[in-house]
Image (tube, rainbow, N blue to C red):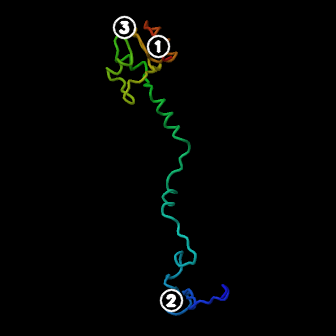
Amino acid sequence: MQFHQLQPIHKLKKKKKIGRGGKRGRYSGKGIKGQKARAGRKLQPVIRELIKRYPKLRGYRQKSKMKKQKSKIAILNLDILEKNFVAGEKITPKILFAKKIISKINGKIPNVKILGKGETTKPIIIEDCLFSKSVKEKIEKAGGTIKISNLQ
């Protein structure tokens, strides 16, 4: 007996074709129309919809880092110093924090920059602070001094 001479004992069972009459006729148990009634349907995965709803963020959080770096400086004007300090008094970031004129940023006393809005008539001493050119002129004109630190 050769391999090509072999015969099966029973006939092969044919796959049932639904939707062609009989008990599973017309809609073949799939209902009427729509994506689910079609042959070869591909439903969209649910997780894809969730992913598509997320906002598209560009870059790697560079903008938030830039904001943090800028916010480490507390900004004051001359008119605030005029109201809160007496003539000849020393002004440093620690003293400003002690008088509650500035507050801590990220748990640290920030660097202070003094801007030239307002006028001063009192001779005051400023240490360890950043300042603008107009502030330097106004304080020296009033008889005060500015001690330049490593911050400049």
Which of the two discs, 3 and 2, sits closer to the camera? 2
The residue singled out by tag 1 in the image is 149
Left or right of residue 48, residue 92 in this image: left
Mark 2 and mark 1 residues within 8 Å of each other at the beta carbon: no
Observer-nearest residue: 17 or 69? Answer: 17
Local SS, label 3: loop
Helix, strand or loop at disc 1? loop
Tell me the mark number nearer the camera, choosing from 2 and 1: 2
Q: How far apart are the alpha carbons under marks 3 and 1?
A: 19 Å
**Amino acid type, mark 1:** Ser
Left or right: 87, with 7 as reference point? left
The label shown at residue 24 is: 2
The residue lying toward the viewer, choosing from 137 and 127, is 127
* Image point (40%, 10%), residue name: 125
Neighbor class of circle 1 (other Cα within 10 Å; few <14, some 14-19, many 20+) is few
If you read the primary sequence from the N terminus, does the residue marked by circle 3 or circle 2 appear first?
Answer: 2
Mark 2 or mark 1: which comes first in sequence?
Answer: 2
Residue carrying label 3: 88
Distance from disc 3 to disc 2, alpha carbons, whole Å, reads 101 Å
